[in-house]
Amino acid sequence: MTDRFNLTGLNTEVQYYQYALELVTDVFDLNCDDDMREQIEKSARHLYGLVHARYIVTTRGLSKMLEKYKKAELGKWPRVMCEQQPLLPMGQHDSPNPSAVKLCGAKCE
């Protein structure tokens, strides 16, 4: 999170970017009213999600997801014909928040 290369271009996509980054990296030290803090926390969640989306498509991120898939850490498909196939997370959109991530089984598609 502190590597500036990973954060390139995100300052234009996240409101209260600097405060959000400080909150995510646990150095946030600003006394503000509850409404402002809520906005900063929302921005921090958005920032974290954007950085995570970048990480997950790297070689290291994909290998971590493969490990989770092999261990069925996200659960197993309950349909009998799918023979306990491990679940995969699948985003419906490239942009954040239009819909929740779905879990799917690769065997029955």
Image (spheres, rainbow, N blue to C red):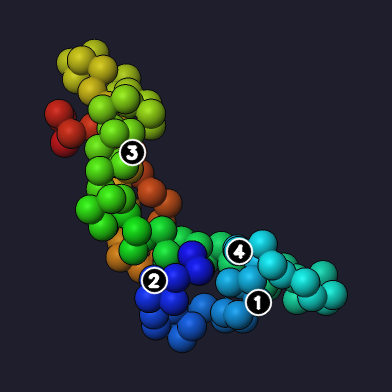
Amino acid tagged 1 = Tyr
Distance CA(mark 4)–CA(mark 1): 10 Å
| Disc 1/disc 3 C-alpha distance (Å) | 32 Å
* Looking at the image, residue 106 lies above or below residue 17: above
Does residue 41 appear in this view?
no
Which residue lies at the image location 50% right of the left edge and 69% below the top edge? 2
State which tag comes first along the sequence, 4 or 3: 4
- Element at label 2: helix
Q: Pointer 2: what residue? A: 6
Residue placed under numbered mark 4 in the picture:
25
Sooner in the amino-acid sequence: mark 4 or mark 1? 1
Q: Are marks 2 and 1 in contact (CB under 8 Å)?
A: no
User: Where does residue 67 sit, x and y in percent of width and height?
Assistant: 29, 34
User: Which residue is the site of mark 1?
Assistant: 19
Q: Residues within 10 Å of mark 3 (few under 14, many from 20)?
A: some
Left or right of 19, for residue 91: left
Residue at (26, 57) in percent of width and height = 58
Marks 4/3 in contact by CB < 8 Å: the verdict is no
